[in-house]
Amino acid sequence: MTKIKVIFLGVLVLVVTGCTLPSIASMTHEGQPGTPVYEQSISDCNTGITVEPGELIQPIPGCDAWLINRYERPFNRGAQDEYYPDLDILSAEFGGDGTWFYLNLALFDVSEDTQQLDGAYGIEIDWDRDGRGDMLIVVLKPGSYAGEDWSVLGVQVWKDDNNDVGNEEPEEPDPPYLGDGYELLVFDQGEGSDPDAAWARAKLGYSAYVEMAFKANLLGDRREFEWKVWSDQGVANVAKFDYHDNFTRDEAGDTIEFHPHFPADQIYGLDNTCAALWGSRPDDDPSLCHNDPIFICPPMDFEAFLLWYYALYGGPPLTPDQEAQLYEKYIRNVCGEPPGRETPTGTLTETPTETATETIRWTDTPTETATNTPTEVPTETATRTADVPCNNDCYCQDGETAWNCPGDCDQKCPNGVCNCFENPCNCPQDCGKPSKDEPCCECGDGACYGNCGENCNTCREDCGACPCECGDGRCDGQCGEDATTCPDDCV
């Protein structure tokens, strides 16, 4: 007789099934992801560089704002004095080769207690750009369940099939929440109509990485969408998206010491980012990193900052000293050079190689796994060579990864090096403060900034014409090349 035991461990629900538990090792996989291709990168606020042991943790103003569903809370509720480095997102890279989409999520460090990555990490996609997330792809506790080889263990794909993420007014807080969030589980650790739909792997140590890959046809024929990333070990409930629709301002709390709703309460132990737009040039959407004052240089002046602050946080007026203190923190995050940590030269922590015997689920709210994915999935995956040496040509190509070729593929900011795709606008910590006369992220400024969505399709004036030639050895998803339209490059 099969026994089912539900064990509550923090925010995760582990469902351990008796002798009928499917073994990941015994699953038949017809194809795995190839070599990741990264074409976009976004930065996030770095809380870790501000943390002093035992002291109050204070995120930079604007990095955490309940009003816009942005959170920078990789710490405990209440005292806000226990830092969770494995939840602190530093940056994310995203790209595709026509068959797969890839995500590389850089974190400050592993957990100090477990030396693992203990949260849930993933990407949220809004494919019709209506302000409502449509798909959420996550990997749970990758430090324990995923090694440096691709695995489906711990990976889930959730879909909002009834379009109620965001409640009545998407992108606006309007509790109480009337919907059920991401209610449809279309892929669960190899279970679903395609056992190869989504994969993950992890790199532990300082700094830590989570890398994910999912098949492009999970999104159907959509070639334009918004994406942003999450880490979560506090709320961690797919049925409660968006969180500012589920928790009132009083319930959520606030992270700024001077705010009347301080401290963080029911929304804690998580981090997310602003959004990037895949497939076309960024517009005036305020949720895009392209328009986020936290990442735009030159920064706002003091008066503009105050108008922005009170619009985001409300509350009674601060004292002049408090306003000046918050403005100084804002300036240091945008264009300053906050103190960092040197990367240690020792060996990174090894990832466990044993196969886990547990099936993990983010929450126990939805009870069924979908039997059909949104579109038909191919049965074969491209075979990609991995013998290309690191040539430091600013292009992360076959055989090059963040591990063996950081100069081309490691876009974490800050990492002490101004890499090919970093510039004073998107990574002032590594590349220095931009000049006052340099317009950031404007097509025609003479610089091809991938972080702003500029590429040969969206800004040829700065980036040049796209090759888009089948047979040039590069599978370019932005050009529409895939295994069907260009088998010479993408097979």
Image: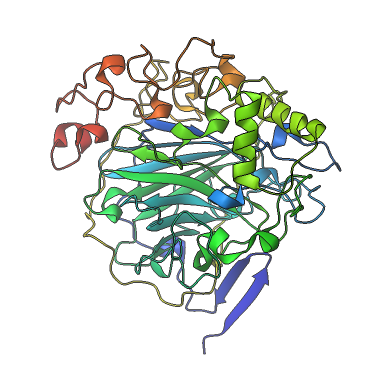
Left-right relation of 194 to 114: left
Q: Position of residue 404 (x, y in %)?
A: 49, 26
Query: In terms of image quadrants, where is residue 141?
Result: bottom right
Q: Residue at x 19, y 36 (%)?
A: 481
The residue depicted at 36 percent of the width and 11 percent of the height is 446
Furthest residue toward right: 54
Q: Residue at x 46, y 53 (%)?
A: 171
User: Residue 468 at what x, y percent from top left?
Assistant: 18, 26
- From this view, report whether residue 444 is shown above or below residue 54: above
Give coordinates of residue 421: x percent, y percent: 44, 21
- Residue in front for this viewpoint, 1 or 408: 408
- Name the side, left or right, on which 261 lies relative to 12: right
Is 355 or 486 nearer to us in this picture?
486
Picture quarter with the C terminus? top left
Of residues 349 and 307, the one drawn nearer to the viewer in this rendering = 307
Percent position of residue 18, x then y: 54, 79
Give the vertical position of 266 relative to 229 (above or below): below
